[in-house]
Image (spheres, rainbow, N blue to C red):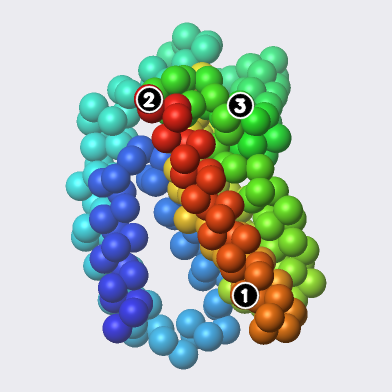
Amino acid sequence: RYIFLGSIFFGLCFYTYATAKLFIPLLLLGFLIIYRRRLLDKKKEIFIGLILFLLIAAPMMYLSFFGEAQKRFNEVSIFSQYEKPINEPLTIKEIAFYFKSFLNNYIQYFSLDYLFLKGDNENRHGTGIGQLYLFYLPLLLIGLFLFLRKRTREHKLLLWWLIIYPIAASLTINGPHAIRSISALPLFEIISAYSISNLLESVKLRKKVHIITAFLILVFLLAIYSISFYM
């Protein structure tokens, strides 16, 4: 049942934003590899789910390669910086240039400036304070430490998500770009919530009440602070 529902929703993701067309296949690839042993017992369900996924995503896939969506990608991709016929082979210099551009973009999506200090340079995508609040930083570090220590299938999938989230956005110019990397938004929340849950489990009830109270006060103060950017 969940395989079928997941196939439908993953297929619909292709109609949300352009970067999902690369992010979703990469995420599914990681899922299939990490859960391969459990999925071997569900070959029939996987096959039907794959058919559902392809039927839903196929129209957008076609437009992405042969329609207007392809023109848009050509305008914003790092490959647009060299104008040459598509059937002409790349030179070593061009390959090195594209790889350097991609790598520089990829690293920026994990930088302190982008995530916590300055955020997206486009004012319509942010307010100049970073994509995440600073208090997320220790929570993310704790969560990553726990993921690497426990390394269950679920932890591995979330780590894979973290690795691939900037790939599609890194293939474009004018980054780091908040909207093109929006696939990371739920991930950072999951990691932070996981850290808080583990911290609460390790303390006594009385301390839990104090921690929760302090956290709610912090959220309230941050809400007031955030509203000031729109006044």
Pointers 1 and 3 in contact (CB under 8 A)?
no
Query: Disc 2 versus disc 3: distance between alpha carbons?
Result: 20 Å
Mark 1 or mark 3: whose residue is earlier in sequence = 3
Residue at 54% x, 25% y: name it: 128
> Looking at the rendering, in which quadrant would you find the N terminus?
bottom left
Residue holding disc 2 = 231
Determine the secondary structure under disc 2: loop
User: Is residue 6 shown left or right of residue 29?
Assistant: left
Residue holding disc 1 = 209
Pointers 2 and 3 in contact (CB under 8 A)?
no
- Could you say which is closer to the camera, residue 2 or residue 36? 2
User: Is residue 84 shown left or right of residue 146?
Assistant: left
Of circles 1 and 3, the one toward us is 1
Q: Residue furthest top?
A: 83
Residue at 31% x, 35% y: name it: 65
Residue holding disc 3 = 118
Number of labelled discs? 3
